[in-house]
Image (spheres, rainbow, N blue to C red):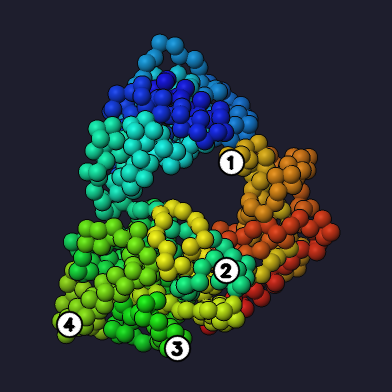
Amino acid sequence: MQRFAKTCEAVAATTKKLEKVSIVGDYFKSCVIDEAAISAVFLSGRPFPAWEETTLQVGGRSLWQIVSELSQKSEGEISTAYRRRGDLGAVAGDVLPQRTDQNLTVLEIERAFRQIAAARGTGSKDVLVRELLTHATPLEAKYIVKIITGDLRIGLKESLVEEAIAKTYAHPLPEVQRANMLLGDIGETTRLAAENKLSEARMRLFHPLGFMLASPIESPEEGLSYFTDAAIEDKYDGIRAQAHVSSGEVKLFSRTRDEITESFPELPGALAGLPHDAILDGEIVAWEYPAKPGDTRQIVDQVSPHADKTESGEQHVTNLGRARPFTILQQRLGRKRVSDKMLRESPVAYLVFDVLYLNGELVLDRSLLERARILDELLSAERVRHEDTRTQRTLKQGTLAFDSDAPTTPASIIRAPVFRAAFPEQLEELFVSAQSRGNEGLMIKDLNSAYTPGKRGKSWLKMKRELATLDVVVTAVEYGHGKRIGVLSDYTYAVWDTNKDRLVNIGKAYSGLTDAEIAEMTKWFLDHTVDDQGFRLVVEPKIVLEVAFNNMMKSDRHDSGYALRFPRIVRLRSDKSPEDADTIERVREIWTNQGKRAGL
């Protein structure tokens, strides 16, 4: 483990990508295959392979206390070290006592991690973590803690680990990347590469693939400047979700690759009956139905880019129903049990817009137009199957309940409607229509493009506009992470209450200012701190910011009762005094107008 930790130190010490790859490659060459495989997982910042559902479940507070106890340092000393270093792993490396007689191996660390994962209860886990760190040198402890927290921070992405594997074992990089994508296990990929068996990698369902990402655009003209053959969809304000379906089993994964199936219990039953194993990409949206939810017209109805149903598209979308505000969907998130009342009052739909895998074949490399045809055929077959079973009086696995007396609320699997536009004026009209339906804006996709997991390019574009801006007052600041360690870059901000006699917090933002502005403001905030809480400082409420945001939700997280979604700092308003900041009345006005726009 000492050799692994020194490798991490060397990687962190250089900013050159090729040098990082070379350092990791040299380390792999010095390892036996088992060590290299486990190290590849660790170098990707994880204790276990991505496909596994195993988690350590060791809380940050527990780690803090263990490091503090083993170091015999005061709470103040640990806090000072944390502010200086920015992560607990680096703190452990600084404050833990030197040990020269230990010789932990990577294999032993992996076994210890599995024991910690298997332990039940915080106390049992803490004992095992304490025992592990007791036998580690400070440098080893630094990276053990970093792996536990999933925060390696050495400038080494998994893509660079893939490059190191390719270089070490003399394989083309695309072969390594594809094997890792199929398996969701960079350790197993390393093993196959070492044994010249990369071609044996097979798709492992129920581990999420990377999501293809979109680049923002500023205008309709830009939206049609990168390609001429475009599919245009509404940009929904929901949760991006990848659905894995196999033999009646269904799991849903968010863009962060977390499983979210429990939050939407009505969707697995709606998807389980697909005639083939599949991986779908789409958006889970709180949905308002135009008719009773059991109406088959809402089930896998579709407007497809290859069908070119442009003229009837607007009426078709209206017939499908409409998205409701994200705040309604938010009530579902993180719940292990969703009540029958919530299922009735907050129905959802899964709007599917892509297919990544079908019946044993990855279709990522096919064009969007081809994937659309595959998706339409899959969902059309499912629609026919549902219609054939409509007269059944029982709810079976893999079928929707069409009977109004059914005990659960059926969910809709809807083919996300697609439009076409050849001119900027048409794109602007579609944008206005999308917003009138309560959606964020538009997605503009190249019909000739392949699906590129985890990448953001110009094949998918997103067009949206900020809902509004607010002038707010900074009330608290926090130290940043990564390149912003040591500077105060995360700002909590507030508006005035009705009587303008107190400030009520409404959100937090950490993007929009330049590094120079952040450095300047850090000095100001340090000089105007009211309450030093360690990582967080309460400051004098004198700095005014203009903050833009895409929408607003009601929230008990802030004392204003509201929260801003996707906020960003537009600029520092040095021309304004705190008294000039907006009030809660302005917030309520924006909220009301947002509801009107969404038809609520």
- The mark found on residue 311 in the picture is 3
Say which residue appears at 45% left-offset and 19% top-offset: 137
Going from N to C along the chain, the mark reached first, 4 or 1, is 4
- Is residue 142 rendered to the left or right of residue 383? right
- Residue in front for this viewpoint, 180 or 121: 180
Quarter location, residue 44: top left
Q: Nearer the viewer, mark 3 or mark 2?
A: 2
- Residue 115, can we see it? no
Question: Which residue matches tag 1?
Answer: 481
Q: Earlier in the sequence, mark 4 or mark 2?
A: 2
Do tag 4 and tag 1 residues touch (Cβ < 8 Å)? no
Work out whether 81 lies above or below 597: above
Asked if 169 appears above or below 406 in the picture, the reply is: above
Determine the CA span between mark 1 and mark 3.
Answer: 50 Å
Residue 388: mark? 4
Q: Nearer the viewer, residue 243 or 204?
A: 204
